[in-house]
Amino acid sequence: MISESSLEKLKILAGAAKYDVSCASSGTKRSNTSGGIGNAAAWGICHSFAEDGRCISLLKIMLSNYCIFDCAYCYNRKSNDIQRTSFTPDEIADLTIEFYRRNYIEGLFLSSGVLVSPDHTMERMVSVVKKLRTEHRYNGYIHMKTIPGASQQLVSEAGRWADRLSVNIEIPSEGNLKVLAPDKDYKSILEPMKMISSGITEAKEERKKYRNAPQFSPSGQSTQLIIGATNDTDNTILKLSAALYTRRDLKRVYYSGYIPVNTYDNRLPALITPPLRREHRLYQADWLLRFYGFRNNEIVNDENPNLDLELDPKVTWALRNPHLFPVDVNTADPLMLLRIPGVGTKSVQLILMARKHNRLNSSHLKKMGVVMKRAQYFITCNELRSRNVQDLKPEIVRQLLIDKKQISSDSAIQLKMFYPTIPVLR
Amino acid sequence: MNIYSFDNTFEGFLTLVFECYNSKQFPDEILSGEGSQTVLFGSDTLVVTDETKAERVWNGIVKKSSEDNAHRIYRVFLSETQETPMLLIKYVRLIIDSEKNEETNFSVPIVVEFNKLHQKVCREAQRIHMFTRFQKTIEGSYYASYAPMYNVLPLCIPHFRDRFADQNWIIYDLRRNYGFLYDLKTVTRIVFDDMQVNPQSGQLHPSILAEDEKLFQRLWKQYFKSICIEERRNEKVHRQYLPQRFWKYLPEKW
């Protein structure tokens, strides 16, 4: 099945898929079935890192890069004169298995251009995934894109076989989407999201009653937003993300700095480099939403519609709320500890454990991984009081915390967030 | 000066702890392995590994702290650095001699140091999960080798046994010259005497590679190249996450 000619196809169809940033392979824990191949590790494993620094966990590939849509921001749009090709479902299944057996990958991320019609494309994609699960008895991770406008029946079938489904929103506001992607509308994107979300909820309910009830997209769903292709503010973007997390129960929203792939289209801004710093700040804000108990309007709001590019969003928030500081690390409740700049989720866990034994001072905190450079202005601990944000005034602290060196080397900061957390081996 | 030496097994180390408490003599220095240095010092104690004694110490640690903590001690033991046995002795004494469970007392330097090394060992094991690359042989089995910084292969085996349950495989530690073989049923520890492996790169001799192995390596290389977004090229991060010492084992970097 796989031959020399597959090399050329792989070149085109991996190249076409690379703009999807999702690489997560976590969230499902599935053991191998007897006689089968593969399992899914709950924490996800990266297998390599591309030269752009992004993790390679999955075989990220398009079934086809033919597309009947003409979305302005997309490299594979109909009106682009590029080489086009398609894999057969068997080729993708074989390639996945061969790569998986060599431990190159954690699983498959299958996407596609819209071939003939959304349903036609979706049907072919489902056939790949079904083949892997049934014929190849493959238990590894599968992430599958849902084609906007695909029927409910196909979405449900996809959810049976895949670990994660995703529909990319791409453009953070409907007005801008209409301008840039005339073939799409929010309905065609949000409807399948709703279907997936209710599919997940139903399957979870069923499994409470019957342990062997079929799973449905057990690792949840995710989406992607393109940053900097439109005039949407960070406020608009984070409002949307927060709503997706709470109302649609999304596992992840990915932010992808717009890469000027179609420079000739004057509906798009003329960017020289992708807005990596803004993307990085959005990921930090996203972390605050998901793991630090922040609400989106605490991070950005109508008065401050965009994130501060020079400082991380937690510091910015703290400087806007100096009256809440300094925080006493020996007595503060966990939620307030999480809000101290320079203190991460791991440090909070360590502080909570350690302070049962001893009163903590700054050298303890430093050893536990607290970034004292930032935290010093926002805490008190078991030693003489140092100058904090109240004594110094927020503007001064702001100047002290801006890292001049970091700003000059924009490229070095991106993508730290893609590195998975290290699991504790048992 | 108290000098102890033991056989460099985990049971041996636990026995050593037992002997220390038994004689109330704690080491100033620990020698591991059959080092010839032992001859040079007259006053050293050679520990004879005893499973019963080892188990008593293990149970003591579990009782004083937790089973998780006992497993952490095992993993730190596998770091096999020169300082490891002394660090572990100090840590185990803290656990055993304290009234309360001290494993979470991160205000004690030894607890922090212990946990840091533990994290390093776990990270190295994780890298084996990540960067193992099997080469398919002419007989249809899969081979991979490495030279991990710490002796982490035993920690990785359950993962590979579950994931690759339907293929024969060997994973070999070139630095410590031993490995594990899985034959669809059980995993056995092996030592090669006649290696058809390049000890530098871990690559199998071309004559024993499966016919399509080179093709899949080329496909993987092509994939690695195509997935990179040129506009975002960032070699610094690339090197940070993909340490150069692993490159020689990765087809995408050949």
Image (cartoon, helix red, strand yellow):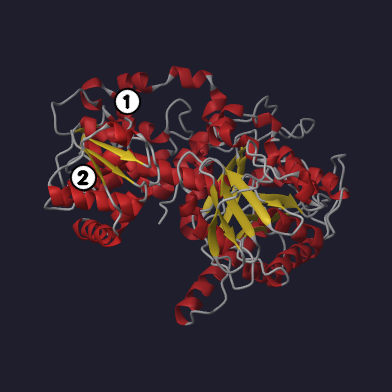
Secondary structure under badge 2?
loop
Determine if residue B167 is in view.
Answer: yes
Tell me the residue that label 2 is attached to: B105
Determine if residue A72 is in view.
Answer: no
Mark 2: which amino acid? Asn
Name the residue rendered at 26%, 22% in the picture.
Answer: A393
Secondary structure under badge 1?
helix
Q: How many marks?
A: 2
Q: CA distance from mark 1 to mark 2?
A: 24 Å
Name the residue rendered at 68%, 35% in the picture.
Answer: B253
Mark 1: which amino acid? Lys
- The image shows residue B210 at horizontal and vertical percentages of 78, 53
When the figure is inspected, residue B226 is found, relative to residue A143, above or below; the finding is above
- Mark linked to residue A373: 1
Name the residue rendered at 80%, 43% in the picture.
Answer: A11
When the figure is inspected, residue A294 is found, relative to residue A327, above or below; the finding is below
Left or right for A129, reference B35:
right
Name the residue rendered at 79%, 47% in the picture.
Answer: B207
- The image shows residue B48 at horizontal and vertical percentages of 29, 52
When the figure is inspected, residue A252 is found, relative to residue A128, above or below; the finding is above
Left or right for A18, reference B39:
right
**Viewer-closest of A22 and A257:** A22
Near mark 1 (Cα within 10 A), the count class, few <14, some 14-19 or many ≥20, is: few
Residue B1 figure quarter = top left
Chain under callout 1: A
Residue B121 figure quarter = top left
